[in-house]
Every structure is written in C-alpha cells, then in structure tokens.
C-alpha cells in the first residue's frame, strides 16, 4: 500500500490524507508494559503509540471507545421520547432495566450496569426519584418528559 494513502487518527481526529488505508492512535494499556516478574523492577521508558489500521472502503473503523453511561442514558431517553405513548408519562425502572439490553443490541453497544445508567437517567429526567404504588409495592419510576421542539 502507498504510504501517502495512510490515514492516521490522533486523539479522535482524522488527518486529511487520501483514504486507501486508515489508522488510529490509541494509548497503550498499562498491563501491556507491566513486567511479568514482580521482583524485577523495570525502567519505564517512553512507549511508542499504538496504531490501529483498517481499510476504509472495505471495513468499518474499529470502535474509538465504549459510550459512557451518560450517553447510554441519553440514547435511552431519546428512544423513549420518540414514542408518543410513553412521552409525558412515568415508566417503571424495572421495565426500563428489562428493555435497556434490547436498545443496546439495536445500537450494537455492550450494556453498562443498569445502576450507572439509571443514575444518569434520573438526572436527565429532573434529578429526583419518583415512586409509584404498583400491586401493593412501592416501585421507582422515571417521568419521561415530552421531547422539546
């Protein structure tokens, strides 16, 4: 392949070069530089950046990172607000926890722990916990606001 056609991604920005081969630079995990012998101390030198390479016309670029729990909560809220039967009503947390993996499957995301997503969802829906009595039990519910136009 031609070196002039190489795309290198530095800190999630692509350089403006022709695209027959693309690459991204990632920080190397700490475990990759750890010494296997714990008694032996290793000098830490400057490590070279890790570069991922892909063909933009034939492949999709490797994921740049896992979406945060806040991004998951925002996408879940957008998904709920897009349904007129749900927007403007309260939805039980147990129901959201049950359908959340389905949303992640549609987005091709790996689900995060529900408690971390729920914390951000609570902040996005007003910052307070809301409870409803259902079948004699007090359950947490999230008010889903109407989508702002």
Image (cartoon, rainbow, N blue to C red):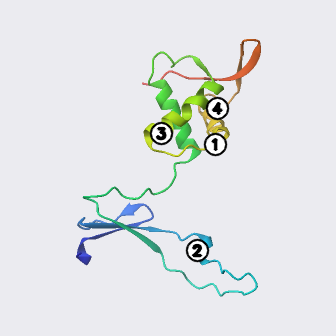
Q: Is residue 50 above or below residue 103?
A: below
Of the residues tagged 4 and 2, which is closer to the observer? 2
Q: Position of residue 114 (x, y in %)?
A: 64, 38
The one nearer the camera, 53 or 84, is 53
Q: Earlier in the sequence, mark 2 or mark 1?
A: 2
Q: Are marks 3 and 2 in contact (CB under 8 Å)?
A: no
In the picture, measured across the screen, residue 69 lies left or right of residue 130, that is left
Between the residue at mark 4 and the residue at mark 1, the CA separation in whole angstroms equals 15 Å
Q: Position of residue 99 (x, y in %)?
A: 55, 30
Tell me the SS state at disc 4. Answer: helix
Q: Which numbered disc covers residue 122?
A: 4
Q: Is residue 45 visible?
A: yes
How many badges with numbers are in the image?
Answer: 4
Q: Residues within 10 Å of mark 2 (few under 14, many from 20)?
A: few
Residue on which the image places disc 1: 113
Q: Earlier in the sequence, mark 4 or mark 2?
A: 2
Q: Residues within 10 Å of mark 1 (few under 14, many from 20)?
A: few
Residue at x-position 59% and y-position 33%: 124
Q: Are marks 4 and 1 in contact (CB under 8 Å)?
A: no
Q: Position of residue 77 (x, y in %)?
A: 52, 31
Q: Are marks 4 and 2 in contact (CB under 8 Å)?
A: no
From the image, which quarter does the N terminus lie in? bottom left
Residue at x-position 28% and y-position 68%: 21
Between the residue at mark 4 and the residue at mark 2, the CA separation in whole angstroms equals 38 Å
Residue on which the image places disc 3: 105
Residue at x-position 70% and y-position 83%: 37
Between the residue at mark 3 and the residue at mark 2, the CA separation in whole angstroms equals 30 Å
Tell me the SS state at disc 1. Answer: loop
């Amino acid at each position: 392949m031609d070196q002039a056609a190489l795309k290198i991604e530095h800190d999630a920005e692509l350089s403006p070069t022709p695209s027959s081969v693309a690459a991204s630079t990632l920080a190397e995990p700490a475990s990759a530089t750890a010494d296997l012998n714990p008694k032996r101390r290793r000098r830490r030198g400057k490590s070279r950046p890790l570069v991922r390479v892909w063909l933009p016309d034939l492949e999709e670029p490797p994921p740049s990172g896992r979406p945060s729990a806040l991004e998951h909560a925002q996408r879940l809220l957008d998904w709920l607000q897009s349904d007129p039967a749900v927007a403007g009503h309260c939805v039980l947390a147990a129901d959201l926890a049950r359908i959340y993996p389905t949303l992640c499957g549609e987005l091709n995301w790996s689900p995060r722990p529900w408690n971390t997503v729920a914390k951000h969802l609570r902040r996005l829906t007003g910052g307070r916990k809301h409870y409803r009595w259902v079948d004699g039990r007090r359950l947490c519910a999230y008010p889903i606001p109407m989508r702002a136009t």
